Amino acid sequence: MLEFLSQPWPWYIGGPLIGLAVPLLLLAGNKSLGISSSLRHICASCFPAGIEFFKYDWRKESWNLFYVGGILIGGFVGGVLLANPGEMVINPQTIADLQALGLNDFSGLGPAEILNWSEIFTLRTIVFVVFGGFLVGFGTRYAGGCTSGHTIFGLSTLQWPSLVATISFMVGGFLCTHFLLPILLAL
Amino acid sequence: MKNIKYLLFGVLFGVVLTKSEVISWWRIQEMFRFHSFHMYGVIGSAVVVGIISVWILKKTHAKSIEGEELTFGVKKFDKGNIIGGLIFGIGWGITGACPGPLLALVGSGLTIMILATISAIAGTWVYGLLREKLPH
């Protein structure tokens, strides 16, 4: 069983299980799936700084902080306890494209040449980790949600603003991959 | 104590994100380069299952286990859906992670993503600060 679970899960197992998070949270306590909201609750609870956007009763949303805390633990369970025994299989065309952009190490979950503490004082790593992370937090809140709140929950409840947001996420990602990454990877 | 169940659900969600490899930078690159169906399959099937589940919940007038009427959190449209969406998309392309995977990556041992998570909190804070000045 453990051996079975530790293999990478195909999309038709992972996807439906992600989708089931929507009814699970609704039935368990009338909660809407949404992960980026937790970032707002952290701001509201730790650094409200008198900002209007952070003046609300975040304690009512504390379930969300437990949920994201669980995701962190889930990463440990899935990534360490149930670690994939083999190397991750990456599409050869993707590898070729990224090699052309200067990446050489395709062993981990992401590029070890960039996402690595030993590179923390290089401009490239600062851009990929700090600047990239900033855009994720700023953009998701500005958009009113992320891939979970808009793409999974919003589309599941047939809300068209979530479709607009999802298309925007994808367009941003395409533009970034094809026009921005070649510049950033050369830093 | 009533929040413990959400911690448990979060663990399950984190395991699924990790084992289906959607937290991987490479999988996100495959998606944005149209080199693999994997991410489209994950997101697409998640949405289909979500739509069917919500349809059943509405059809059967299901209530939560605490007996509450279900509400489906209305998403209002504003320009932020587009502008913020594009900004997030760029960040997604750079870090290879949306907020859930950021945390799962930290848990799975890519601890440098703690910095990306802190930056994401900072990004949210700056949005809160500038909110009135941004087009919506």
Image (cartoon, rainbow, N blue to C red):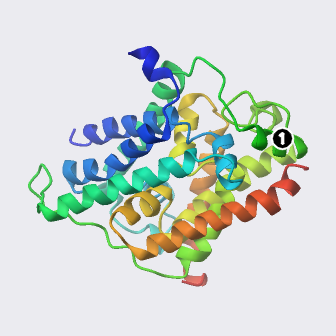
Q: In this view, does B128 lie above or below B33?
A: below
As drawn, is A92 to the left or to the right of A152?
right
The number of numbered discs placed on residues in the rendered structure image is 1
As drawn, is A116 to the left or to the right of B101?
right
Instruction: Kindly tell me whether residue A72 is visible in this rendering.
Output: yes
Residue, x 39% and y 35% (percent of image)? B11
Instruction: Kindly tell me whether residue A31 is visible in this rendering.
Output: no
As drawn, is B118 to the left or to the right of A128?
left
* Residue that label 1 marks: A96
As drawn, is B65 to the left or to the right of A151?
left
Q: Quadrant of residue A90?
A: top right
Please provide percent x and percent y for residue A128.
75, 49
**Looking at the image, which is closer to me, A67 or A61?**
A67
Residue, x 24% and y 54% (percent of image)? A26
**Looking at the image, which is closer to me, B126 or A103?**
A103
Q: In this view, does B85 lie above or below A133?
A: below
Please provide percent x and percent y for residue A43.
49, 58
Residue, x 12% and y 57% (percent of image)? B63
Assess disc 1: are there few (<14), some (14-19) or many (≥20) residues with their C-alpha within 10 Å of its C-alpha: few
Image quarter where the N terminus of chain A lies is top left
As shown in the figure, which amino acid type bears the numbered disc 1?
Answer: Ala
Chain ID at mark 1: A
Please provide percent x and percent y for residue B82.
58, 76
Q: What element carries label 1?
A: helix
Please provide percent x and percent y for residue A40.
47, 60
**Looking at the image, which is closer to me, B57 or B125?**
B57
Q: Is residue A80 above or below residue A100?
A: above
